[in-house]
Image: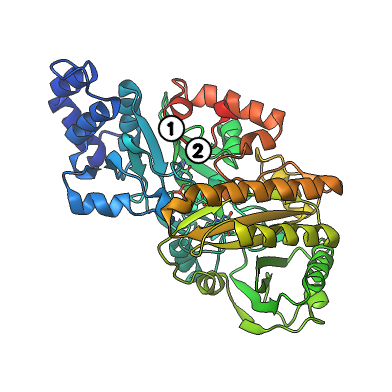
Amino acid sequence: MINIFPSTDLVVRALFARIQSSRQLLDNTITKRGLPPTTSPSQLACRCLAAILPDYYTDSTNASAYTVLETKNWSSNCNLPAACFLTPVHSVQIAVALLIITLAQSKFAVRSGGHNPNPGFAGVGAEGVTIDMQGFTALHLSADKSYATVGAGLRFGAVQSYLDEQGVAVASGRNKDVGVSGLLLGGGHPLINSLTGLAADNIQSAEVVLLCYPWVVKASQTQNSHLFRALKGGLTNFGIVTSFELKTAMPRNIWYRVVAYSNSNPRAVFDALVNVQQRMEKDPKAGIEVTCSPAGFTVAFVSGQHTDDPEVFAPFRALTPTTETKPPTNGTTLEFISFLSAPQPEASRDTVGVTTYPDTDLYMDIYREYLAATTTGGSATTSFLLQIQTFGTASAQIAIRNGGNVMGTSARAQTWWNPIAQWTISADDAKVHKTLLGLADSIKAAAQAKGLYDKFIFANTASRDQNVLESYGPANLGSMLVVSAKYDVPGTFQKLQKWGFLASRA
Ligand SMILES: Cc1cc2nc3c(=O)[nH]c(=O)nc-3n(C[C@H](O)[C@H](O)[C@H](O)COP(=O)(O)OP(=O)(O)OC[C@H]3O[C@@H](n4cnc5c(N)ncnc54)[C@H](O)[C@@H]3O)c2cc1C
């Protein structure tokens, strides 16, 4: 490994000097010489990491720093302890840490923005090491402004703010606090998918730290192209990404409007939505997202240009909003996602994802199922929302043009349903989780009954109990297993991560 990383780099030199001076301790620890036989794999790993990366290491003996790292996740039920946290800043530190974790056979987890609401996906528990990527903050724009290099520990707000000042933007999600890495590796549903493709399809290349020679690779359409394709939707199955090159394919200047409708006429709202979905197939500049609650519907309209009341949204003109939370605005991508990122309270969250095809009667069935679940599925502190994201055929075509991905989305306009829950009483965790899984089953059954079900499960909204990678289809799952065997020779990502959508468990 020492030959791969430049010896002129100060971080590399400092690390290898530490390894030299700690040789005895490292040997004794990994072989458990002089240690109680009960020493756990995570204790072994943390002992080594503390010795060679002391400035990037935190355990519970440093209570204040430890608490900050332990409670960083967006959802309270995902705030997990760790035997130790590692906050590296350089790929060589990750490569060595992964080697130690593998030698010790310790459990581990990787975290970037910490916004995934599945417990254990970005936090490991006391029996492992959590590697937090917050130190990877590279951010610059290419001279021709066609792509940005983005550190894997950044959140999209920081990225869009930097790019906005330079007159460009990238395809991101709707919330500025969500981490770049988790969103991209899960596919990434953006503001206008028919215009940009999914956020992952805007990755031009990624730098990935591996568990085997050559330790760090660039994955792109021309280098390690199978890994490149597998990363897009393939999550945390192959290595740890340290940076992405992202195309600046999202327009900076956009039009948007957000309105609310009452629950008095759900059919009218769904009719308008299905109609707009059909029109969007001919207008790739348009995007829409609907959030259903028992009280009514919030609809966010967006167009990828400065304009005035786009015709594509005409089916909604006949409906009278109860509130206009954001009047029609010619603004920027940054301003829009900032508007959508209101502070959220500390609470537990849960999620589930189902895909169907557009149809008003089906949407009515699903809304009824959702309302039934909200009345019985939680407690006084539980709120359930039903989010609707659309996916256009143009998005599938952009994916192919940009080197493909492993998600296996069908080339047909579709609807990604995302029931989510928020609550504060931890005794309700199991009940809420069961309610969401039951609701997903009901949505699936309603869609199957009408021949409108699609087996694809979107990773970024999926529950830990859903088989996301199987939903990509056997060929895509098979290719992920091949890539995993080639780039993660010891199988560390499959065996030592406790949770996550892992190819070997699909
Ligand atoms: C308020 C909110 C709004 C959202 N809006 C959208 C949206 O508009 N579109 C959308 O697609 N999704 C959206 N999501 C879902 C979001 O994309 C996922 O929850 C995503 O996993 C979060 O990414 P993160 O980096 O913050 O997560 P983390 O919880 O840190 O990580 C998620 C997963 O990625 C893995 N991972 C993280 N970093 C790396 C890395 N560097 N290398 C390898 N693996 C890594 C982790 O191990 C974990 O399994 C939203 C979520 C929230 C809470």
Residue 332: mark: none
Residue 279: image location, x then y, percent: 83, 66
Vertical arrangement, residue 443 with respect to residue 336, above or below:
above
The residue wearing badge 1 is 497
The residue wearing badge 2 is 500
Ligand 1 neighbours mark 2 (CB distance < 8 Å): yes
Q: Which residue is drawn at 44% across and 58% down?
A: 155
Q: Distance between the residues labelled 2 and 1?
A: 7 Å
Amino acid type of disc 2?
Gly
Q: Which of 268 and 22 is in front in this view?
A: 268
Secondary element type, mark 2: loop
Residue 281: image location, x then y, percent: 82, 60
Ligand 1 neighbours mark 1 (CB distance < 8 Å): yes
Amino acid type of disc 1?
Gln
Q: Which residue is drawn at 64% across and 83% down?
A: 324
Q: Residue at x 70, y 78 (%)?
A: 262
Residue 184 left/right relative to 215? right
Residue 117: image location, x then y, percent: 49, 51
